[in-house]
Image (cartoon, grey):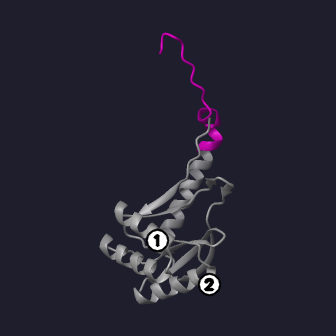
Amino acid sequence: MIIPVTIGISDKHTVMVDLDNVSFRKAKGIAKLACKHFKLEGFIILKSSPEHYHIVFDKPIKHWSKVLKIISWIAILSNNPDVWKWACMQAIKESCTLRISEKPTENGVKPKPRIVYRFGRQNRQVKAYLQFKRQILRLLKHLNAESRLNLRANFYFSSSNV
C-alpha cells in the first residue's frame, strides 16, 4: 500500500503566504502592497491550483514575531477566512509552511506549485527557497525511482511473530 505524502517547506525567517480562493489579480495586489509596506524587496507568486497562490518574499526577517505580524496583516487584508485560518495555524506552529509537492485530493491530484509571477529582488530568501525546493524534489524523485518496491512492501506475519 502506498501512503500519499505531501511535502512542504517551513521557515521562520521567510515571509510566505498561502492565499486560497483568491484571484491572481488580488494575490498580486496584496503581494505588492505588503512588499511596499514592509520593505520586503521582492517576491514570487506560485500557482498551487486554480484560485490558489503561494507567495514567497525575498527579505529575510530576523524575528518570528515580525514574520507573524506581516502574515497577519496580509491575512486581514485578504478578507478571506481561509487565509485567516492558515495564518493562525502558522502562529501555532511558529513557522510558515508552503506545499512544494503534488497533493492527493478526493478529486485527483493537485500539481506542484509553479511560478507564475516575479517582482523585485529574488536573490536571498526566494533564491534559497527555490534551491531548497529543487533539492527536495530531486531527492524525492530519486527515492521514488529507487525504492518503489520498498514503498509497496508487504509485511507477512507468521503465527510465531504475532
User: Residue 46 location, x and y as percent?
Assistant: 59, 71
Hey, which residue is sitting farthest front in the picture?
A: 81
Q: Is 109 rendered above or below residue 125?
A: above
161 displayed left or right of 145: left
Res. 63 in view? no
In the rendered structure, which disc, 1 or 2, sits on the residue that comes first in sequence? 1
| Residue placed furthest toward the right | 108
Q: In which quarter of the image is residue 14?
A: bottom left
Write down the residue under mark 2. Answer: 25
Residue 24 percent across, percent down from the top left: 62, 79
Q: Does residue 63 appear to the left or right of 113 in the view shown? A: left
The reply to whether residue 6 is in sight is yes
Q: Residue at x 60, y 26 (%)?
A: 154
> Residue 92 occupies which quadrant of the picture?
bottom left
Per the rendered image, the range of residues in magenta is 143-162
Q: Would you say residue 128 sits in the magenta stretch? A: no
Q: Which amino acid does label 1 sit on?
A: Met
* Between 103 and 63, the one nearer to me in the picture: 103
User: What amino acid type should be assigned to the residue bearing mark 2?
Assistant: Arg
Residue 16: give its label: 1
What's the residue at 55%, 52% (across, down)?
Answer: 6
